[in-house]
Image (spheres, grey):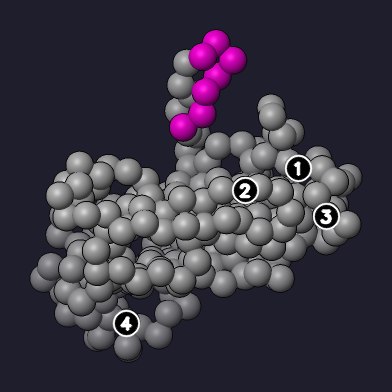
Amino acid sequence: MAVDPAGGVRATALWAEPELVIDDESERSESFGQEAASADQQIRVLARANRLGLACDPATRHPGESAAGDVLDFPLRCVAHAHPDCRFRWVRVTLDLGGTAGASIQDLSPRDEVSEHPVKITTTYHGGLSFSISALPVSPELSAERTTEQDVFFPSITASGIGFSYAIWDFTAIGEAPLHVDRTLRLLATVPPAAAEVPVRLTLRASVSARGFLGRIPLVGRQTATIPLQAAGG
């Protein structure tokens, strides 16, 4: 959420929610068995009924923090919500900044995380080229009250992309527990000072098991968007 000049709360803007389709690039013999070969209408409708989306506030631009260019602190909210007859097994978020020459990812949050219990993650930018990330276990007595906080998580998370122009986050279900993602992601990147906007190629992939079907449905959604920018303190 963000605060508008009048002191009210401005809702985070929906940034990207591409339509999900059967991922024809997946190895269907492994992902969905023989039923994937037909991918009949019922399967396709069920695939589209799942939701993968990203929302964002404007990225904060910090000029002069690096010789490599301006530093961009980019906040995202990732949501993965399965249809009641489906269950996500894993979700992958890929953000490609390669459309801006010289763009380079400096840090990501969350990084690799695995937890069997809720943990409060605090991500802070103090300047420079990295985030300050701290993790504080949440006591069982407080877990029920804190489950709505954006920084409490349960699934396994892995991330990569530092030093490259694209970032990847993987959310993976633990055991047979259902995977529901509602998480804040932060990306710190350097961009040329002359860059007025930063286009992003977004790819969302997921593996879904569906009631009544053998194997898993491979899903993919793609979209191009532009990172909204604001100056530090703006």
Q: Secondary structure at mark 2?
A: strand
State which tag comes first along the sequence, 2 or 1. 1
Which numbered disc, 2 or 3, marks the residue that appears first in the sequence?
3
Q: Amino acid at mark 3?
A: Ser
Q: CA distance from mark 4 to mark 3?
A: 44 Å
The residue at the point 69 percent across, 27 percent down is 234
Label 2 sits on residue: 125
Q: Is residue 57 above or below residue 26?
A: above
The residue sitting at the bottom extreme is 29
Query: In the figure, is residue 149 to the left or right of 59?
Result: left
The quadrant holding residue 45 is bottom left
**Structural distance between the alpha carbons of marks 2 and 1:** 11 Å
Element under disc 4: helix
User: Mark 4 or mark 2, which has the lower sequence index?
Assistant: 4
**Is residue 3 highlighted in magenta?**
yes
Mark 1 Cα within 10 Å, few/some/many (few <14, many 20+)?
A: many
Residue at horizontal 52%, vertical 57%?
133
Q: Is residue 195 magenta?
A: no
What's the residue type where badge 4 is placed? Ser
Is 19 placed left or right of 186 in the picture? left
Q: Name the mark on residue 66.
A: 3
In the rendered image, residue 3, in percent from the top left (x then y), is placed at 52, 23
- State if disc 1 and disc 2 touch (CB < 8 Å): yes
